[in-house]
Image: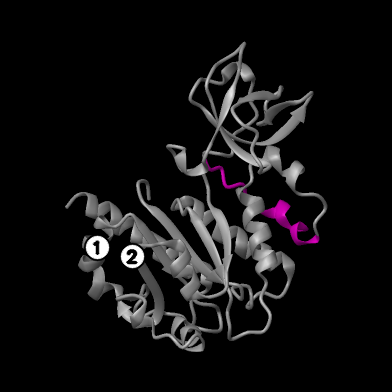
Amino acid sequence: MQGKFFSIAIPNTILSDSTHLRDKTTKIGTIARICSIFKVNSVYIYKDNNEKFGEEDIIKTILEYLDTPQYLRKHFYGINPILSYAGLLPPLRTPHHKLAESHLTIKSGDYRDGFIVEKNGETYADVGLPELIPIDGKSPKQLRITVKFISEYPDLRCKLIRREDVNEYWGYEVITVSSITDYISASHSDMIILTSRKGRSIVDMWWEIISEIKEKNNIGVVFGSPKHGIYEMLSKEGVKPESLSKYIMNIVPQQGVATIRSEEAILSTLTILNLAMNLGKQM
């Protein structure tokens, strides 16, 4: 979904239909792959107020682990029981997951993720290359960074940039919020889509969605939990879905199963929106 900023919101109870950590890990891994395929920029985890217990720690940890380039994982993740089955998941292979390469191949203008290393009073970036790279500019406060190379071998140097300034898809960030309404406020989306079996059929909304999505730059999509739909969740907040969005969408009308799993709903919805966006470009 190049050129658009996309976010999705999922509940902290999205794993409630999975019992074993292996199954939970597989489900989150599938969601991470779907988000990466369709270039989702932010994944929000909101609290399901219908349930006392959520699993945002598991969801957030696995999502962030998968988004982290392999060469950085050892620096940010020690032995963590939550990640016991993460090795079973396929890599995302997004543009920021660079493969091992020689510093000789780096070109000015290339991007890489890395982390800060202080050495002899100087600031360097470890970006998975055989040598540390000097950073031009002020030392950042955060450990994980994104850099842009400003020179080539034999005088490799880089500068810090914001993740959102990279001119290609650079993975997703994971953010926790307290409710659906808080997500809508925090995401600053100019088009919110609520997914619900009780919503209007995508067939009836199709041309309207294409026309609208073409004009919007920041699109957010909210998904319910395996046990509670959007209407039930928002009723706990004392909010009517219609007050938040005119796009309450049933993405799979006349479904052939009793319930659609969360990862299936995310895949179906982002597939449809990707098609709508690309058709809108041709109008």
Q: Position of residue 7 (x, y in %)?
A: 45, 60
Quadrant for residue 193, please give it: bottom left
* In the rendered image, the vertical position of residue 7 relative to residue 98, given as above or below: below
Q: What amino acid type should be assigned to the residue bearing mark 1? A: Glu
Quadrant for residue 55, please give it: bottom right
Q: Are marks 2 and 1 in contact (CB under 8 Å)?
A: yes
Q: Is 204 on the left or on the right of 230, as rendered?
A: left
Q: Is 239 on the left or on the right of 105, as rendered?
A: left
> How many residues crowd mark 2 within 10 Å: few (<14), some (14–19), many (20+)?
some
SS assignment at label 2 = strand
Residue at figure coordinates x 25%, y 56% from the top left: 214
Q: Which residue is mark 1?
A: 212
Q: What amino acid type should be assigned to the residue bearing mark 2? A: Met
Q: Position of residue 123 (x, y in %)?
A: 70, 28
Q: First in sequence: mark 2 or mark 1?
A: 2
Residue at figure coordinates x 51%, y 88% from the top left: 236
> How many residues crowd mark 1 within 10 Å: few (<14), some (14–19), many (20+)?
few
Cα distance between the residues tagged 2 and 1 = 8 Å
First to last magenta residue range:
81-94
Looking at the picture, tell me which residue is in the foreground, 239 or 107. Answer: 239
Q: Which residue is mark 2?
A: 191
Which numbered disc covers residue 221? none
Q: Position of residue 147 (x, y in %)?
A: 57, 32
SS assignment at label 1 = helix
* In the rendered image, the vertical position of residue 235 relative to residue 168, given as above or below: below
Q: Position of residue 56 (x, y in %)?
A: 65, 68
